[in-house]
Amino acid sequence: MNLHGRPTAAELVAAVAEFLEHDVREATTGQVNFHARVAANALRMVERELRNTGEAEARAALTGLGFTDETALAAAIRAGDLDGRDHDVTACLRTLVGHRLAAAHPGYDAQPGFDVQPGYDAQPGFDKEPLS
């Protein structure tokens, strides 16, 4: 439920993005046209973030490892507190990255190679020491 009624923040952002994508871009060229495109893309990212798609899944992934936010997870990884739980950590990170990509670059998760499962050696030899 939206406390402020209609239009929602996401709907307002979408309306401005649409204005930039259509009215402004059709009426301009060059640098202004490019900047309108960049601004519209940024607003579309904000719109998707406001709609919170996948937020519950990302929160559940963190909670499943015993953390309330990404900062605490990062600190635990740096401290070595999650050593030996590679599969769980990788699954959580994939969920978090997928959530971010859904807002920043929708459809990226449908690209070939994104569905590589944790533990799968997508690039043979990648985990080996670099050649001297």
Image (tube, rainbow, N blue to C red):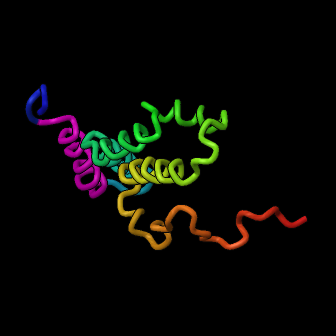
Residues in magenta, as a range? 7-27
Farthest residue toward the top?
A: 3
Residue 1 or residue 80, whichever sits in front: 80
Residue 66 or residue 42, whichever sits in front: 66
- Residue 84 visible to the viewer: yes
Farthest residue toward the front?
A: 84
Q: Residue at x 24, y 43 (%)?
A: 51
Q: Residue at x 62, y 69 (%)?
A: 121
Residue 104 or residue 62, whichever sits in front: 62
Snapshot quadrant of residue 6: top left
Classify 73 as above or below 105: above
The magenta stretch spans residue 23? yes
Q: Quadrant of the C terminus?
A: bottom right
The magenta stretch spans residue 126? no
Classify 4 as above or below 35: above
- Residue 34 visible to the viewer: no
Classify 50 as above or below 72: below
Q: Is residue 120 left or right of residue 68?
A: right
Query: How many numbered discs sit on the rendered protein?
Result: 0
Specify the principal SS of the magenta part.
helix
Q: Residue at x 22, y 45 (%)?
A: 14
Q: Quadrant of the N terminus?
A: top left
Q: Residue at x 49, y 35 (%)?
A: 70
Residue 5 or residue 68, whichever sits in front: 68
Residue 27 is situated, as x and y percent measured from the top left of the image, at 28, 54
Farthest residue toward the right?
A: 132
Residue 53 is situated, as x and y percent measured from the top left of the image, at 28, 47
Q: Is residue 10 left or right of residue 80?
A: left
